[in-house]
Image (cartoon, helix red, strand yellow):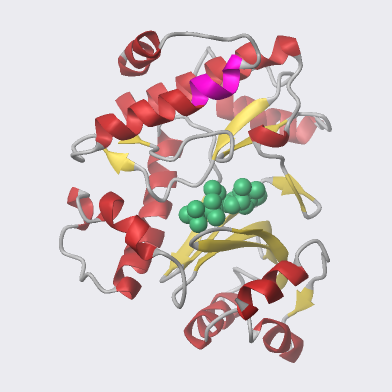
Amino acid sequence: DKQMKKIEDKRDKNRTFKKDSSFLKVEENVFDVPTLKLLYTLSNKGYITEMGGSISTGKEANVFYAKGNEGEVAVKIYRLASGTFKSMDPYILKDPRFTNIRHSRKDIVFAWTKKESQNLIRAKKAGIRVPRPIVNDRNVLVMEFLGKDGNPLPILKDFALDDNEALPVYRQIIEYMRRLYVRAHLVHADLSEYNILIDPHQDETEENKSENEKFSAKDEKNTTGLIPEPIIIDVGQAVTLDHPNAREFLSRDIENIRRFFKKYGISEDSKTILEKIKQK
Ligand code: ATP
Ligand code: MN
């Protein structure tokens, strides 16, 4: 539709919009009024100081690049007015953490955004590299921007792994699935080459090198910082292990990862992978 077209048109233009009247002018047809008001509130609080261009237009959410008091951020905005929120229902309505939410679309979206933020925190605590959530309010999640100078890191699908890089990246992903399962008690439920970013570690400065070491300090199995490192994103639909469909979602995640790494000559059977993931 028209609004979607406008967002698409804005893509790749890489313009930034200062926090003044032009912010509203440019965005008024992209966001609904409550979302705009929320963005103003977040900008008054300093979480967003400059709104940038669109990074992605998804089924339910748009991701924008922005700057805030803490530096570069990604702003994920779930659409209130359009979208197929029916697809959210099976994930959230049976989640024991969200049993008493009202079932209006708006309430589901707000709960969903909160769930994504909570899941990011749980995953990070479990030693998984994920974007750090900064603030969430209603349908907006502000998080750490993965990338540099406005350029987001590539998704796994678009990153050409060298033959010697595929296996360590694959192993790291399986290890992250294990940590998510045994430590965070979560199943991602939408894991694929589309929801994994790759940090190529190409412009390793001393500063971010020590950052990487912090990430891997908790676990001996992690990368040295020289091998591309996977980062898990899009955890809004992740479910707890007591969710009735957790097993089925986990099998689907495993199949997606298996299928992707087959072309690199990696083929472990599903049962072996499942055992690894459940290994305490
Ligand atoms: P949904 O399907 O729930 O609508 P989505 O697939 O649109 O979600 P994400 O997968 O979270 O949303 O993000 C879409 C894209 O935006 C990603 O593929 C990635 O390229 C980019 N992106 C998301 N989060 C970040 C981030 N923190 N830093 C940089 N880029 C990001
Ligand atoms: Mn996604």
Q: How many marks?
A: 0
Which quarter of the image is occupied by the C terminus?
A: top left
Q: Residue at x 75, y 64 (%)?
A: 11
Which quarter of the image is occupied by the N terminus?
A: bottom right
Say left or right for 196 vs 210.
left
**Does the magenta segment cover residue 163?**
no
- Residue 218 visible? The answer is no
Image position, residue 207 (x, y; %): 76, 35
Image position, residue 17 (x, y; %): 77, 77
Q: Is residue 149 above or below residue 40?
A: above
Q: Is residue 272 above or below residue 242?
A: above
Q: Is residue 140 above or below residue 226?
A: below
* Front-lying residue, 224 or 154: 154
Image position, residue 230 (x, y; %): 61, 29
Say left or right for 249 vs 127.
left
Furthest-front residue in this view: 1
Q: Residue at x 36, y 68 (%)?
A: 110
- Predominant secondary structure in magenta? helix
Quarter of the image holding residue 15? bottom right
Boundaries of the magenta span: 257-262
Say left or right for 146 vs 102.
right
* Front-lying residue, 237 or 16: 237
Image position, residue 242 (x, y; %): 18, 37
Q: Residue at x 38, y 48 (%)?
A: 237
- Residue 53 visible? The answer is yes
